[in-house]
Image (cartoon, rainbow, N blue to C red):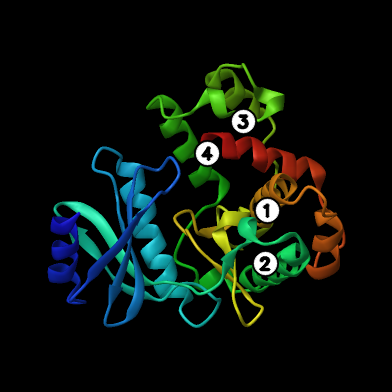
Amino acid sequence: MTDIVRALEAAAGAGPLRLVREVGHGRSGDVVLELAGPQGRLFAKIARQDRPDRAHELRREAGALAWLDGRIPAPRLVWAGEIEGRAAMLSVALEGTPLHDLAAEQRVAGAVAAIRTLAALHALPVASCPFDERLDAKLAAAKARLDAGLVDEADFDDERAGRPAAQVFAELLAHRPPTEDLVVTHGDACWPNFVLQPDGRAAMLDLGRFGVADRAHDLALFLRSGAYNAPDLDLKALVLEHYPLAALDEARLAFFRWLDEFA
C-alpha cells in the first residue's frame, strides 16, 4: 500500500501521510485506508479498476460531501480526483460509533439521532441538489447492472430467494409507483452508514448513491437494516415519532426494498 499512500500525498497535497490500517469495505472491492496526516485521522477511498459503477459512486460521494458541507453532519472532504487512473477521495474521519456497533442501551438514542438526520436531509431544497436519483435513473442503473451480470441472486431477500434476476426485475417494473415523493436522499441509508457522534448527533457515511429521490427509498433501507441490527426496537414507531410523516406507505417501502436487490 506504500505506493498508493505516496500517490495520494502527491495528488492531494495532503502529506505527509502515514498508513494506519487497510479497512475492509464489504463487497465493493474499493481500497479503503485509514491514514494519519496533518489534518488528523483521515480515510482514503480508491475505486476498483474493473468496475466503472464503483468509480461513478465514488465521484458521486465526493460531490455529495462537497455539497453537504455545513448542512448535514458528514465527513469533511479533503480532496477528490484520480491516482493511477482510479477515482479516489480523501476525507476527515468522523468520531463516534456506527449505529450497528452501538451497545444495546444506546440503540434507541442512535436510531432517533439517525432518524432526525434523515429528516433534516430530506428537508433540504430539492431544486438546489445537483444529483439525480429519481426512478428513471435508478431503474436504468439497475438494468445496466442486470445486463452486466452484476446482480447477486444469492443475496436476494427471502421473498425473492431462488428466483432469476431477470424475472424479479420484470416484476419490479410492473409494480413501479405512479408518483414520486421527491426529497434529497442518502441513497443507502443502512445502519452502518450512520455514526453516533459524541455530541449526540448522527453523521452520514458512504454517499455514493446520494441524490434527489423518493423519501421511501431511504426509509425502506433504514427500517430493513434496523430490523436486522436491532430487532428488539419498534423502529417504525420511532420513525413515526421523530420523522415528519403521518403514516408509512408499506407498498412503497416494499417496492424500494425490491429495487435495492439491483443496487
Query: Which residue is drawn at the image coordinates 82% and 54% (left, top)?
Result: 233
Residue 181 visible? The answer is: yes
> Who is closer to the viewer here, 140 or 99?
99
Q: Nearer the viewer, mark 1 or mark 3?
A: 1
SS type, badge 3? helix
> How far separated are the C-alphas under marks 2 and 4?
27 Å
| Residue 174 percent location from the top left of the image | 66, 28
* Residue at the spot of label 4: 139
Mark 1 vs 2, N-terminal side? 2
- The reply to whether dot 2 and dot 4 touch (C-beta < 8 Å) is no
SS type, badge 1? helix
Mark 1 vs 3, N-terminal side? 3
* Residue at the spot of label 2: 114
In the image, is 159 to the left or to the right of 67?
A: right
Query: Which residue is drawn at the image coordinates 73% and 67% (left, top)?
Result: 106
What amino acid type should be assigned to the residue bearing mark 3? Leu
* Residue at the spot of label 1: 222
Mark 2 vs 4, N-terminal side? 2
The quadrant where residue 124 appears: bottom right
What amino acid type should be assigned to the residue bearing mark 2? Ala
Residue 186 visible? The answer is: no
| Residue 12 percent location from the top left of the image | 20, 72
| Residue 44 percent location from the top left of the image | 31, 62
- The reply to whether dot 1 and dot 2 touch (C-beta < 8 Å) is yes
Mark 1 vs 4, N-terminal side? 4
Mark 4 crowd level (few <14, some 14–19, many ≥20, 10 Å Cα): some
What amino acid type should be assigned to the residue bearing mark 1? Phe
Mark 2 crowd level (few <14, some 14–19, many ≥20, 10 Å Cα): many
> How far separated are the C-alphas under marks 2 and 3?
30 Å
- The reply to whether dot 3 and dot 4 touch (C-beta < 8 Å) is yes
Mark 3 vs 4, N-terminal side? 4
